[in-house]
Image (tube, rainbow, N blue to C red):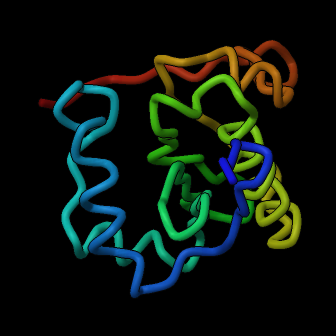
Amino acid sequence: MSLSAADATIRATTAADVPGLLEFIHPFVEQGKLLPRTEEELGILVPHGFVAELGERIIGVAALEIYSIKLAEIRSLAVAAEYQGQGIGKRLIEACLRLARERNVLEVMAITSSENVFRACGFDYTLPGEKKALFFQTR
């Protein structure tokens, strides 16, 4: 019996997931699609993270970093290449958005090079009142 993306489960991450998460994100870091994360950094994201699993294999990951009651960010969204475009990323984003609503966070942002999945989940380039987020890199 062959499993498809529709069979994937989305669940909260646990501390036991950290070694598997490090291994899973490694190719994305090498490709420059994700920032490098240490085991400690992933451990900090665990209480607000989610994995997509197919069988016992991690095929996707995302985390919600809550900065304040006003703002959170979806971080480290990645889906295994063979499952991209099949709704896994959207389901991970939706899990993060549910958590943000449960925590009464007012806005959730995403910094991404893959905007389509976020736009499909209702994200847009502007904040209310046509405000825009600007960034300055210090390194």
Judge left or right: residue 139 versus residue 25: left
Judge left or right: residue 68 versus residue 111: right
Judge left or right: residue 56 versus residue 8: left
Judge left or right: residue 12 versus residue 18: right
Q: Which residue corresponds to the image point at 34% horizontal and 75% vertical from the top-left?
A: 18
Looking at the picture, tell me which residue is in the foreground, 92 or 101. 92
Q: How many marks?
A: 0
Looking at the picture, tell me which residue is in the foreground, 41 or 17. 17
Instruction: Say if residue 107 shows up in the picture.
Output: no
Instruction: Say if residue 84 shows up in the picture.
Output: yes
Looking at the picture, tell me which residue is in the foreground, 91 or 3. 3
Image quadrant holding the N terminus, namely bottom right
Q: Going by the picture, which residue comes out furthest to the front?
A: 1
Q: Tell me residue 14's x, y (percent).
A: 50, 83
Q: Tell me residue 101's x, y (percent).
A: 87, 62
Is the residue 94 above or below the residue 124 in the image?
below
**Quadrant location of residue 108?**
top right
Q: Which residue corresponds to the image point at 87% horizontal and 71% vertical from the top-left?
A: 102
Q: Which residue corresponds to the image point at 66% horizontal and 23% vertical from the top-left?
A: 85
Q: Which residue corresponds to the image point at 45% horizontal and 69% vertical from the top-left?
A: 45
Q: Tell me residue 109's x, y (percent).
A: 64, 38
Q: Going by the picture, which residue comes out furthest to the left?
A: 139
Image quadrant holding the C terminus, namely top left
Is the residue 63 above or below the residue 136 in the image?
below
Q: Tell me residue 11's x, y (percent).
A: 68, 71
Is the residue 86 above or below the residue 18 in the image?
above
Looking at the picture, tell me which residue is in the foreground, 43 or 16. 16
**Quadrant location of residue 98?**
bottom right
